[in-house]
Image (tube, rainbow, N blue to C red):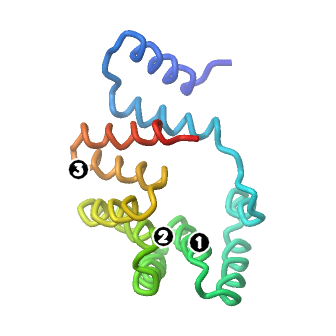
């Protein structure tokens, strides 16, 4: 059964074989589709709660982890992501600021602050934080949002470059 994902993938393969440029929207959708196809849940027991929209349970678990180990940046970062997804950008920004002040050399705080800035449509600030995050520890998520920031600013070549980095670095 064909769907839009098949069409975009077919279009991309055709363009690559014929050495033709791919539109930025088609390329972005291709990257998104690619990761939906290969995404496997991490070996964490926390993952099912967020994917099954049990963010309340996930936040409870992350709070327990943080209560036992205040240096656990991943739990704080994931809490911030849930706060962004629930629309509470002020709490997410507070979480990001806390991570940045306590762990300035770790990427999680920079990436979370970049995501908050992106959601607030402050793309210049988001670019700075996401670039800082990538310098510390590159992630596919950071490249993705960096590409989206460039796209929103109208810098299509830079956006395409970031999306290509995702494909180059994908497992």
- Give how far apart the Cα atoms at labels 3 and 1 are: 30 Å
- Taking the view exactly as shown, the residue that stands out farthest to the top is 18
From the image, tell me which residue sits under label 3: 153
At 71% across and 88% down in the image, what residue appears? 68
Q: Is residue 145 left or right of residue 77?
A: left
Residue 108 location, x and y as percent?
A: 48, 70
Residue 118, relative to residue 64: is it above or below?
A: above
Residue 168, relative to residue 149: is it above or below?
A: above
* Residue 116 seen in render: yes
For marks 2 and 1 on the same chain, the one whose residue lies earlier in the sequence: 1
- For the residue carrying disc 1, how many other residues have a C-alpha within 10 Å: few (<14), some (14-19), or many (20+)? some
- For the residue carrying disc 2, how many other residues have a C-alpha within 10 Å: few (<14), some (14-19), or many (20+)? many
From the image, tell me which residue sits under label 1: 74
- Give how far apart the Cα atoms at labels 2 and 1 are: 7 Å
In what quadrant of the picture does the C terminus appear?
A: top right
For marks 3 and 1 on the same chain, the one whose residue lies earlier in the sequence: 1
For marks 3 and 2 on the same chain, the one whose residue lies earlier in the sequence: 2
Q: Judge depth for marks 3 and 1 and give the one in front.
A: 1
Relative depth, front residue between 171 and 63: 171
Residue 139 location, x and y as percent?
A: 48, 54
């Amino acid at each position: 059964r064909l769907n839009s994902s098949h069409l975009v993938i077919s279009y991309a393969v055709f363009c690559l074989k014929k050495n033709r440029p791919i539109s930025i929207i088609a390329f972005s959708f291709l990257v998104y589709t690619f990761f939906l196809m290969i995404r496997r849940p991490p070996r964490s027991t926390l993952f099912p709660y967020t994917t099954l929209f049990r963010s309340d349970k996930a936040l409870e678990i992350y709070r327990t982890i943080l209560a036992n180990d205040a240096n656990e940046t991943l739990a704080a970062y994931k809490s911030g992501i849930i706060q962004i997804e629930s629309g509470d950008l002020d709490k997410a920004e507070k979480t990001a600021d806390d991570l940045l002040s306590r762990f300035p050399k770790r990427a999680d705080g920079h990436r979370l602050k970049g995501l908050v800035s992106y959601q607030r449509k402050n793309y210049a600030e988001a670019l700075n934080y996401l670039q800082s995050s990538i310098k510390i520890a590159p992630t596919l998520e950071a490249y993705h949002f960096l590409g989206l920031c460039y796209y929103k600013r109208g810098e299509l070549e830079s956006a395409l470059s970031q999306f290509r980095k995702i494909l180059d670095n994908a497992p």
